[in-house]
Amino acid sequence: MAIRRGGSRIIQIMKRIFLILLFVFPLSLLSASLSYGQVQVRLRVFEASNVGTRIDSSLKDMRDQFKPLVDFSSYRLLKEETPTLYLNQSVSSPAHPGRKIELTLIRQHKNVADVRVKIQREEIDVLNTQVRLSPGRTISIGGPKHGEGVIIITLSAQF
Amino acid sequence: MNHEETQLISRCQQGDQEALKEIFDRYQKKVYRIAYGVVRHREEALDIVQEVFVKLFRSIKNFKGRSHFYTYLYRMVMNTAIDHARKMGKQFISSLDEEGSFEPSEEAGKWPERILLQKELEEKVKSAMEKLPAEQRAALIFREVEGLSYQEMADAMECSIGTVMSRLHYARKRMQELLKDYVGPQGQSGGPSNPLKEEGVR
Amino acid sequence: MTDSCSSVSKLLEKYFDREVTDKERLLVESHLQSCLTCRDTLMSMEGLRTFIKAPVEEAVQQEDFPWVWQKIDREIRSQEKGSWWQSLRSWMGLSPLFKKKVWIPAVATIATLLFISTQVIFKKIPSYSERSVVEYIESETYNIMVYESEKTKTTMIWLFDEEDQESSRS
């Protein structure tokens, strides 16, 4: 019908594609940045000693990992937490009586998270370290005396 | 196009909504008449009027003044109304062919019953018009409802006068076929002769 | 139908629409005086016009257009609020760049930038063996030993009390 006029359909479609790409590009950058900045960690505190032979079932895998360095006969879980760390925000947790462990996410990129670990005793930093967590890797900090044994703290990330 | 209207259009092109209001006041009835002529439904026709003036405000920058303003406006109304009618037509269930309701009442005898409820007749006319191609429907509305001359219709529909006449002719012919039991000599109420039926016999 | 009917019938519609010349009008009117068929045809056209026009005229007469202008005004204002989108669209429509179809290489540039940026964002980080697990470590209270096992993916930081060290030496 001569009544109706219209522009080129193909040009309209190409213009729309251009617009979509124009918005998708910064959105992809934004979404990439938003997916970083947080990580969930698994923090376990247990007592290792040579008194008795009891090993908590959840720690049997840990014993094998420790064997090259330390080999205790008993491993008892004292505490387990799975806090979520956000970039540059510290999370504190009592490690065992008199001690506090503070975790801060320093950096994160894909499946690697840099975490600063501070152990404080009576408000004094007894340990200050920065470790890199990656899938399947566990960081263990052990040695401080506790009762008949020692305290071992393990830290791993869940990506 | 007179000078006053030219100024109104110019102001409207610069985004002056007051100017659009004045155009609206001048043309609202004409626009409604065409819209109602196509869709035959009050609420739809009012929606079309609203849509047309919003579209007009957006697109009036494209009006270069090479034709009369009213032909530009009428073209817009007709396109919008036909689009609405198409959407409505998809929901429209009954049709002349399906109902077969033009069989004359037995009580009336040989000739069709001419006394129909106004609403039912309206539905028949509406249904018949929906069967027309868009160009023919536009020609019929412009001529029968709005009373445009052949030249004005040619400007609005952007075609020649010969094409206008052809579309009118086929539109009228088709409408008379579809409404053959109702369209007869004016003033006669079910007279013994129906010229169209006699035409069909020939 | 007589011969004059066939010639006049072609003018009937024009006559009905008052688009005939004076000469044509006289011809039709003189024919109508003696031809019932053509008169009836004219009346049928009149009847059709009535059916089409009368309800419309009635509707227009009864209509007072309630709130129509207010709705139009509101619609225009709400569209103006979305003006960043509209102005972008109008920019696309009116921009001389698009008229010259430079958007084709622009699309190619955007696609290339997208490809490069995803490579940068998702590039492989250095493998574990290239970077130490323990970035730094310090303690004023303990002596420290760091043990790393690639096999078990374990890093052990062991803290020795000074008393322990003295007793072990002794």
Image: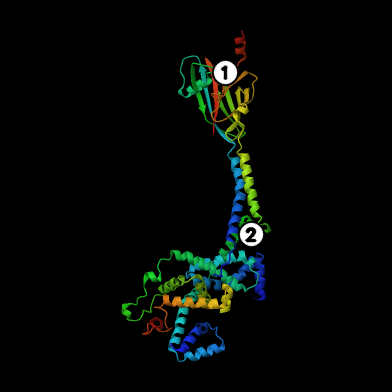
Foreground residue among C161 and C86: C86
What is the secondary structure assignment of the residue under circle 1? strand
Is residue B146 at least partly visible in the picture?
A: no
Q: Position of residue B123 (x, y in %)?
A: 42, 71
Q: Position of residue C158 (x, y in %)?
A: 59, 19
Residue placed most toward the observer, A77 or B185: B185
Chain of residue at mark 2? C
Side of B183 relative to B158 (left or right): left
| Image mark for residue A143 | 1
Q: In the rendered image, which quarter is residue B79 located in?
A: bottom right
Residue identified by numbered label 2: C93
Left or right of A58, for residue C142 = right
Q: Residue furthest left?
A: B107
At horizontal 61% and vertical 42% (from top left) the residue drawn is: C118
From this viewpoint, which residue is outermost toward the top? C170
Residue at left 42%, top 77%? B177
Q: Quadrant of the N terminus of chain A?
A: bottom right
Across and down, in percent, residue B152 comes to: 58, 77
